[in-house]
Amino acid sequence: KKTVRDIDVAGKRVLVRVDFNVPLDASQHITDDTRIVAALPTIKYLLDNGASVILMSHLGRPKGQVVDTMRLTPVAARLSTLLQQPVATSSDAIGLEAEEKAQALKPGQVLLLENLRFHKEEEKNDPEFARQLASLGDIYVNDAFGTAHRAHASTEGVTHYLPGVSGFLVEKEINFLGSALENPRRPFAAIVGGAKVSDKIAVLERLITMADSILIGGGMANTFLKAQGFEVGDSLFEEAKVDEAKSLIAQAQQLGKKFILPPDVVIADRFAADAEHKVVPAQQVPQGWRILDIGPATIETFRQALAESQTIVWNGTLGVAEMPAFAKGTNAVIEILVERSQQGATTIIGGGDSAAAVEQAGAASKMTHVSTGGGASLEFMEGRVLPGVAALQDA
Ligand code: 3PG
């Protein structure tokens, strides 16, 4: 795809879709600004090259209503601090105020439009809404990798009215995730966790064909344990996916791949941060107890399985990472990946919960790449076309 490098931006008004969908706490403080920081290279490049920049993003899921707690005001403030320059705002993404403020921008100045999803037309990919957004700029840049799997007015619709190119973040994400999967240095290991098998079936099917070993943890492991004939006590598992889990294990075996399930687990007497808990073999989960993390033997098994790997892709936490008592598996895997990175392996974190855990552990800079996409990186890893990328001009 063409990138901002391939076009002349001097003196142009550049409309940039970014993913500033960042987590906010109850008092509207940004708790993780990774996505804002990740968009800075493109924004700075445009400003340094004489463009004026009109940024647009969604935040949360306001479903077409104006929701005050989902305004982009805190994001504008953080962006202004990071850029060390004022960031103008508009109280609506379209309309007179947005048009006048966009027109008034001088080269080197930045405007952030209000939350796109205050209009239901955004998610509906309404052509008229897309046209109104497009009218604010001369060129369109998509740097919202986290939203590239959505065919919305600001990611797809707008490209029917303005030529679109990718920003540096989209370029980087596609390069890292793409080369890790398609042209990995081997052995190639994939670690897959998260709550549900149903969310990960497509990615598991693809990883089974591409990776040399697949390591399973998180709530979804329960369905695989069940598929192996083990009892999982009161653990959550997906009854309807047990057969599919069986056939995934069989597929992996047929292809000669290592498919590693947790040999031991941490079980708790209830789903709570202060629950009573203990470690048991995965075959011995009693009634009344539920699996909330992988155990120490599993961590050792994972460590050995990853010791030779030259490419490691990880998606999905391995336990209930937001509860310290059940975050040990996730944190141990982060440590293993940091170590493997230092030894020269390529480590790719596929967004969402696992990326947040890496961020929280302060380990992001030690990985080869931490994706800013949750759903987007998952869909990309599944081999699906991302509409927001497909709509951009070819190089
Ligand atoms: C994300 O956080 O994954 C993206 O910003 C997309 O958000 P959405 O799932 O609400 O479309």
Image: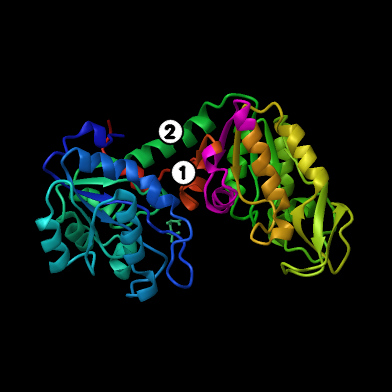
- Give the amino acid type for the residue marked by disc 2 in the picture: Asn
Q: Which residue is drawn at 69% across and 34% down?
A: 213
| Quadrant location, the N terminus | top left
In terms of image quadrants, where is residue 287? bottom right
SS of the residue under disc 2: helix
201 above or below 178? below
SS of the residue under disc 1: loop
Q: Which of 245 and 177 is in front in this view?
A: 177
Q: In this view, does 179 lie to the left or right of 315?
A: left
The reply to whether residue 203 is visible in this rendering is yes
Based on the picture, tell me whether residue 325 belongs to the magenta stretch.
no
Image position, residue 185 (x, y; %): 58, 24
State yes or no: Cβ of the residue under disc 1 lies below 8 Å from any atom of ligand 1. no
| Quadrant location, the C terminus | top left
Image position, residue 260 (x, y; %): 75, 40
Q: Please state the quadrant of the image where ligand 1 appears.
A: bottom left
Label at residue 384: 1
In terms of image quadrants, where is residue 335? top right
- Give the amino acid type for the residue marked by disc 1 in the picture: Arg
**Which portion, as a residue range, is magenta?**
340-365
Image position, residue 63 (x, y; %): 38, 71
Q: Residue at x 13, y 54 (%)?
A: 105
Q: Nearer the viewer, residue 389 or 142?
A: 142
Disc 1 residue crowd, few under 14, some 14–19, many 20+, Cα 10 Å: some
From the image, tell me which residue sits under label 2. Answer: 175
Give the CA separation, mark 1 to mark 2. Answer: 15 Å
